[in-house]
Image (cartoon, helix red, strand yellow):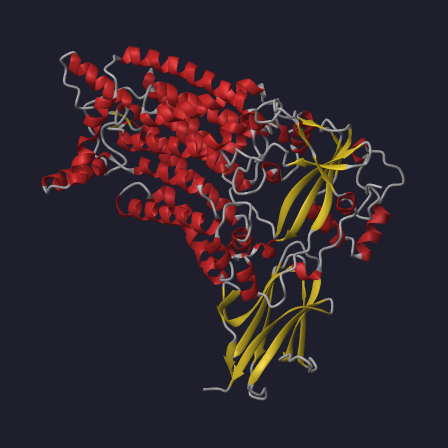
Amino acid sequence: MTDSPDATVTNSDSPSTEKGGFFFGQELPHGMAIVRILLPLVLLLVIVPRWPHARELFSADGAAAPLTRNYANSWQLPVPSGTVAVGLTTLLAFTLVTSSIGWCTRISLIASTILFTYLNLLDCIGSLTKYSVIATHGLFCLSLSSCGAVWSVDSLLRRRDLAAGGTSGTTPSHFDAWPRRLLQIMIGMVYLGAALTKMHTPAFFSSDQMRQWMITNVNHSNPIGEYLSFYPAALVVSAYVTVLWEVLFVFLAWRGWGRAIMLSLGVLFHFGTCALLGLYIFPLVCCSLYFAFLDEQDFARVGAFLQRLREKGSRIAEGMITLPDRLTGLIPDVRPRVATTAFALTILVVVAGGIETEYWLDPFGLRRAEGAYELVELDKHEVRSMLRDSERIQESDKYLSFDIGSGLFGDVIAHQRTQFRHGEVLIAQCTLNPPHEDMYIECNLHEHRVEGAADRIIDRVGQIVDRNTLRSSWEFFLFDALPPGKYDLVFQSRGKEITRRTFELLPAE
Amino acid sequence: MKRRLAICTIVCYLGALFYGVASYAVGFKVNHSPAMYFFVWDMFSGWAAYEERLKIIGESEDGNFYQLSPPPWGDYQPFSDLSRHNYDSHSNHAGAVAANTLRHTQHEPMRRVYVVQEVWSKKFNLPDELWADRYPEPKDPHIYYHLRQIRDSSGNLIQNRSTWYGHQNQMALRDNPRLIQDIHKGKPMFQVNPLNRGRDAGAGGRNAVP
């Protein structure tokens, strides 16, 4: 769509130029080409594992879960038959590959966009997520662009065709910038929307929500996050930094230091979601889209840098600069029209092969020698106990943590410790799990419990916690009437001990 | 002509993006249609304090119980090591999952399908070493079960109940005697609104499976 080649080159440092403007400035689509190469490869990481289960996930022969079923009054999405679903999934995998390598790029991208969106809509519980929605937008913007004009099989074939006709085709055409601008604005709006979501959720800024996310098992393994969940003060800081970055991104990520800082923080943020929350694909999708923020001048700088390295004898630089010529040699010497015909034939072969392979894989086991699978029988008593009335939440499950330390930061203990001195203020804090009713909870000071000895109470302090409160704190002034030694703080609810913490009281310095 | 088409695309696309963000900001028709899912960026809109799993159980006419998910031919795990049906937070698709398993397995005739929530406090997800470091009491998770739905053997919904969270909230509210008294004062003798037919009688378990 953006095939209005023009020799006018924009000053890429400025998002708004005199000729062409923000949307219609002319540029080489290198940034979008990198997005085109990377994004489909990332999506293949999820599509390939789904392919053997395509019949189950996306067809009427399986357990399709179309998003439209969640909306009673909405139009209902047509659910394909098993064979069609397998064929479509195979086709999607193929077009993602051809999009990445840039073969019949626009057709591949349009097909990928439509198929990826449709199949995800058919499985809203296993396939449709926000990262797949972001990827859909990314594919959509790519299909509008001329990202196949550079670093692609199409461009190599075109160059060879022009060379055969006696024309020098080494200088690629320039195209309108607007698809890249749409992608950039989309990324900024995603972060702005995410910031609004967090602003609507007070428990995010108090660290309560992040703590729960870090200890859930619905995502991949995240041992660092599980450890960090016990340091809520750090989560409070990260919460405000995250929201600030998300709000500012769409305003500052266009040029200069603002762009460098916003994109760097973005990479750090997404790395954090991987390490702390166990998200793998989401960060990869977002980081692959970041290359849309690279301008023509960035690539010119990289090219000049590689050239300097090459002159100094660097083999890596030599390899990267000569890569297009070496790849050209791998492509058969055919005309673009023949290549397009080969593309269509390859689709037929791949799709037919995929359907046939899936048939022989027999995912439901219907054609096994021993026949269809039998169901696993469950213990009757166990099941009947599950089907009884729901019981109330136990008192011990209503609390998430009980910590002691000093200093409050964002309403959480800043410094958790177990040794204190006379004259200091000890803060005991319990974090509660929602939902809970209005409660009366106690934090009582005991002598340190020793086996065989009585559990003597020194001080008893209780307070009311209403159903909307998730945290409650007690302050104990450690006056010198308390002899140095070990003590216990006992957290009680409904008169029953839930947990206790031991601390050591030392003399004043 | 191409320039006009491009301008039209830009205006429509940016308009949709801005509409999504604005509608979410003011809470206007956010869940009005499936298309809004592509323009509302409500990631991380809420995480619960309890870990939840779904069990889909079939009851045969002989009174035996069978596991319907994960199916016997193997499991699809979309994000971690959890089966796909566990991500069906509203249980809207449990019937389709159950019907798929029944359709492709050998089994005796099924009378009912039960969708049960299995819930435990998330703190018990911590590794044993971290738990021992932070909690003096032994790690002993208590698991709660809550009957969420009853369906027929084709997966059609017969009875839909509140979620475990909704049920616990209701039980907490009903601990208030004055509130219960006010509710009973305001309850009509006859149910005249057809929409109120079949409403759950309460947390007292009148709709429990015998």
Residue farthest to the left? A311
Q: Is residue B38 left or right of residue A61?
A: left
Q: Position of residue A220 (x, y in %)?
A: 50, 46
Tell me which residue sits at (69%, 79%) in the image.
A455
Q: Is residue A126 above or below residue A165?
A: below
Which residue is depicted at the point 22% across and 36% down? A299
Task: Determine whether A398 is above or below A339 in the image.
Answer: below
Q: Nearer the viewer, residue B122 or A14?
A: B122
Give the residue displayed 57% in from the left and 40% down from the top: B27
Question: What residue occupies the far front of the structure in this picture?
Answer: A369
Residue closest to the eye, A97 or A470: A97
Q: As drawn, is A438 to the left or to the right of A128?
A: right
Expressed as whole percent of the image width and height from the top left, the position of residue A349 reads 42, 15
The quarter of the image holding the C terminus of chain A is bottom left
Q: Is residue A492 left or right of residue B10?
A: right
Q: Quadrant of the N terminus of chain A?
A: top left
User: Is residue B108 rendered to the left or right of residue A449?
Assistant: right
Location of residue B210 in the rendering, given as x and y in whole percent from the top left corner: 85, 41
Residue B18 visible to the viewer:
no
Q: Is residue B150 in view from this perspective?
A: yes
A77 to A394, vertically: above or below: above
- In the rendered image, which quarter is residue A163 located in? top left
The number of discs equals 0
- Residue at 46%, 22% in the rendered image: A90
Q: Position of residue A33 (x, y in %)?
A: 30, 30
Q: Quadrant of residue A143?
A: top left
